[in-house]
Amino acid sequence: MLRILFMIGGLALIIVTYLPFDSLAKDTALARRLLNSQGCKACHTFEGDGGKDAGSFEKMRERLSWAEIRMRLVNQPGTHADGSMPDFSHLSDEEIDALIYLIKPR
Ligand code: HEC
């Protein structure tokens, strides 16, 4: 009986350990799709590839917090230097979160 309980416990632990990683992996795939479909790389560089006009995501992650990145994406008034960054507030919360995570992994 004790053995079965341990097995169930072990199984639960494995599920709890791997579930979040699985969903983060899915988020990354979603973010990469968005990067292409929303044209981010026409202006921004990511992983050494893309436009040079608007800076690289790798540099941003050192400077900006998650909240600041979110503000830039949903185009809050006053967060854009010259307004040439498009507004992405048409994206869902899940899509915005996925993009933020890709730009700045935990
Ligand atoms: C048409 C060109 C263009 C596209 C497309 C574009 N951006 Fe930008 N982005 C800019 C420019 C230019 C800036 C910097 C100036 C500004 O803030 O207006 C910027 C700024 C940013 C910033 C803030 C950087 C900082 O240093 O404050 C983030 C974050 C960002 N972009 C993410 C994205 C993401 C994610 C996408 C795709 C969903 C995207 N951008 C698509 C041009 C673009």
Image (cartoon, rainbow, N blue to C red):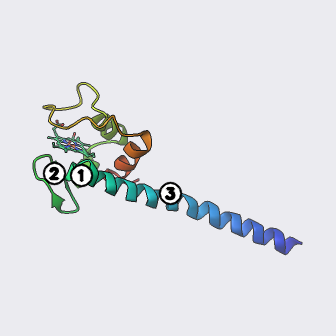
- Name the residue beneath numbered marker 2: 42
Determine if the C-beta at disc 1 is less than 8 A from ligand 1: yes
**Residue type highlighted by circle 3:** Ser
Secondary element under disc 2, as helix, strand or loop, is helix
When the figure is inspected, residue 55 is found, relative to residue 88, above or below; the finding is below
**Is label 1 in contact with label 3 (beta carbons under 8 Å)?**
no
Question: Mark 1 sits on what residue?
Answer: 57
Considering every residue shown, the one lying at the far bottom of the view is 3
Instruction: For the residues labelled 2 and 1, say whether their Cβ atoms are less than 8 Å apart.
Output: no
The alpha-carbon separation of the residues under discs 1 and 3 comes to 22 Å
Q: Nearer the viewer, mark 1 or mark 3?
A: 3
Callout 1, which amino acid? Phe
Query: Could you tell whether 18 is left or right of 69 in the image?
Result: right
Q: Does residue 33 show up?
A: yes
Q: Amino acid at mark 2?
A: Ala
- Let me know if residue 56 appears in the view: no
Question: Going 26% across and 47% down the picture, which residue do you hit?
Answer: 38
Q: Position of residue 65 (x, y in %)?
A: 33, 42
Query: In the visual, does 80 lie left or right of 30?
Result: left
